[in-house]
Amino acid sequence: MGSAAETKRRTIGARVGGRSERVVASVLRATLRELARVGYAAMRLEDVASQAGVAKTTIYRRWPRKAELVRDAIRETNRHDDPLPDTGSLRTDILASLESVMAWIATPEGRAVTQMVTMERGDPEVEELCRTLRDESRARRAALVMRAQERGELPAGTDAHLVMDCVFSPVLSRAVRFGEIADRATCERIIDLVVTGAEHGGGQRRAGTRSGGQRRRRPAVARPSRSTSDSEPRASVPRVQK
C-alpha cells in the first residue's frame, strides 16, 4: 500500500481546477460506480477508464494496482482529509464524527464499500485494503480523545483507540452487517455510556497493555531442567525391624 504522501501526490497534487484534477475526480467517481455494479473482484481498470472517459494508460500511470485506486476512491468520497469536528466537547465531537460516518454509509458509495467489506473480505487484496482504511480511520478518531485529554476532559493515560472503538464498533457493525443505521438518540446513549466510563478512569491503560486494550505477552521464562537423578524414582529402603 502506498503512503498518504504518495496518495496526495497522485490526487490532490494536481492543479486545483485544472484538467488533471478533473480527470482524477472523474476516475474516482467511476471507480465507485463500478465497485457498486460488479464488486471488487470483477472490477476491471479498463471498464473504469471507459466510464471516466480517459485512456487506460492514464489510470495505470497514477494507480498501478487496483487496490490503490479503490483506496483513493474511498478516501475521496469519505472526505478522509476533512478537518475533524471541533465543538469544544468530546461528546459532541464524537457524535458529529459518528453521524458523518452513518450518513456516508447510507449513500450509494457507502453501500458499495460496505458490500465489498461483507462479501469479499476473503480476497487478500480486499483484506489488506480494509485493514489499511480501518487503521487510518482509527488513528483519526483517536485524535478526538487525545485532544479531549489536553482539554482536561479525560484522565491522562486514557486509551484513545479503545474509547473510540467502544463507540464506533457496535454502531458500524450493525450498519455494515445488518444494514441498521442507528438513530441520533441511540448514538448519544452509546457515547454517554463510553465517555462517562472513561471520565472515571475506565479507559486508562493498565501496565503491560497496548493501545486498543491488547495485552502484551510476557516473554517465556525457561524453567531449569531437573537432573537425571531428580527425575528418576528413588528406590524404597526396606525398614529393618528390631
Image (cartoon, rainbow, N blue to C red):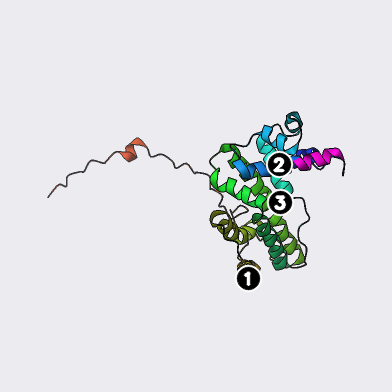
Q: Position of residue 126 (x, y in %)?
A: 60, 41
Of circles 3 and 2, which is in front? 2
In the rendered structure, which amino acid carries the disc numbered 1?
Ala
Of circles 2 and 1, which is in front? 2
- 24 in magenta: yes
Q: Which disc number belongs to residue 185?
A: 1
Tell me which label, 3 or 2, sits earlier in the chain. Answer: 2
> Which segment did they paint magenta?
17-26
**Residue at 72% from the left image edge and 49% from the top image edge:** 77
Q: Which disc number belongs to residue 30?
A: 2
Task: Give whichever of 98, 203 is nearer the camera.
Answer: 98
In the rendered structure, which amino acid carries the disc numbered 3?
Asn
Main SS of the magenta part reads: helix
- Work out which quarter of the rendered image holds the N terminus and state it: top right
Quick one: label 2, few (<14), some, or many (20+) residues within 10 Å?
many
Residue 27 visible in the snapshot: yes
Where on the picture, by quarter, is residue 201?
bottom right
Q: Which type of secondary structure does the marked residue at label 2 adopt?
A: helix
User: What is the spatial separation of the Cα atoms under label 2 and label 1, in whole angstroms?
Assistant: 36 Å
Residue 1 visible in the snapshot: no
